[in-house]
Amino acid sequence: MHRINIHCVGMRDGLQMEKTVVPTDVKIQWVEGLYKANPDIVQIGSFVHKERMPQMADTDELFIELNKRGTKPEGVTLSGLVLNEKGLERAMNCGVGMVCIGASASETHSMKNTGKTVEDAVSRLIKMAQEVEKTNIKLQVSVQSAFGCGFEGDIDENKIYGIVDRYLNAGIKLISLADTAGYANPSQVERIYNKVFSMAPDDVEFACHFHNTFGMGLANCYAAYKAGVQYFEAAFGGLGGCPFTKKAAGNVPTEDLVEMFQNMGRIKHINIDALNDVAKSISEYFGRELPGYVYKTGSIKH
């Protein structure tokens, strides 16, 4: 059975929708709380212009401070999202452990998110990926709006396969399919992943990122797992969503995802109690209940 890797994107995808800008010292407390949970990857932020997304204005500072502290467990990787060459330069200068770069399969979403056509965005991404591959920094690239678009509706699956094929031809080894609008359903997820796995050499791994817009996020994760997906992106408490889609909704809750896999006997290295503690702290900070379940109920094992 393949190893399951949990990529907690709450610090980026979770917080980017929040209007209240969280102070850097509070973010550091939450990250160090996640360290206790021992997820495989923690996404710290995105390297975007501070006026475009004020919540991410301290991403460089966060990486520098967290690397300086030396409190990160050896098995945890710190990732950051990059949208352009300037962002990549910033990421490589502040100690990022994994660079995540994405291009959308939807022309409308691509223009709203990056101001680029799909063709231009993919070509630009591959050039940036080639720069990352010259270093020791890990790399993940993604196809956004892979399962549907809030503006365009259904996406021709051949467009997804075409983008994945270009990634494979560029030698990229970790590819994520992102359900930006939350339109995916389990049978679609299994079909698309079966296809991309059939296209890829054995040394290529796949990731998934599902939004819970219509309540199918966890079911879609299970479908991806059945297809062989190795990396799962989720956010504490189910917080967040993409601000550049039509109906923004939260992510799959990290605690709920881990609870499912732990009860299946598939994850043993993650401390779900520590995950719950972080989600509770964030719920208290924002003064509202988060969409997730397990941080409120506790684990079945108790």
Image: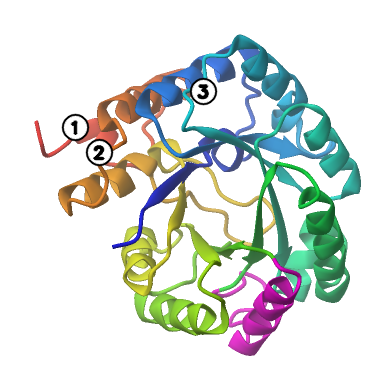
Badge 3: few (under 14), some or many (20 or more) residues near its Cα, within 10 Å? many
Q: Quadrant of the N terminus?
A: bottom left
- Distance from Cα at disc 1 to Cα at disc 2: 5 Å
Q: Earlier in the sequence, mark 3 or mark 2?
A: 3
Percent coordinates x, y for residue 15 in the rendering:
58, 34
Q: Is residue 170 left or right of residue 284?
A: right
Do the residues bearing badges 3 and 2 touch, measured as CB atoms within 8 Å?
Answer: no
Q: Residue at x 51, y 60 (%)?
A: 207
Residue at the farthest left position: 302
- In the rendered structure, which amino acid carries the disc numbered 1? Gly
Q: In which image quadrant can residue 65 be found? A: top right
Frontmost of labels 3 and 2 is 3
Percent coordinates x, y for residue 229 in the rendering:
42, 65
- Distance from Cα at disc 1 to Cα at disc 3: 20 Å
Label 1, secondary structure: give it. Answer: loop
| Residue marked by disc 2 | 294
Q: Nearer the viewer, residue 229 or 234?
A: 229
| Residue marked by disc 3 | 31
Q: Is residue 214 left or right of residue 144?
A: left
**Magenta segment boundaries in residue numbering:** 147-171
Badge 2: few (under 14), some or many (20 or more) residues near its Cα, within 10 Å? many
| Residue marked by disc 1 | 298
Q: Residue at x 52, y 64 (%)?
A: 205
Q: Is residue 11 left or right of residue 134?
A: left
Q: Is residue 170 magenta?
A: yes
Q: In which image quadrant can residue 215 be found? A: bottom left
Label 3, secondary structure: give it. Answer: helix
Q: Residue at x 64, y 79 (%)?
A: 160
Dot label at residue 174: none
Label 2, secondary structure: give it. Answer: helix
Do the residues bearing badges 1 and 2 touch, measured as CB atoms within 8 Å?
Answer: yes
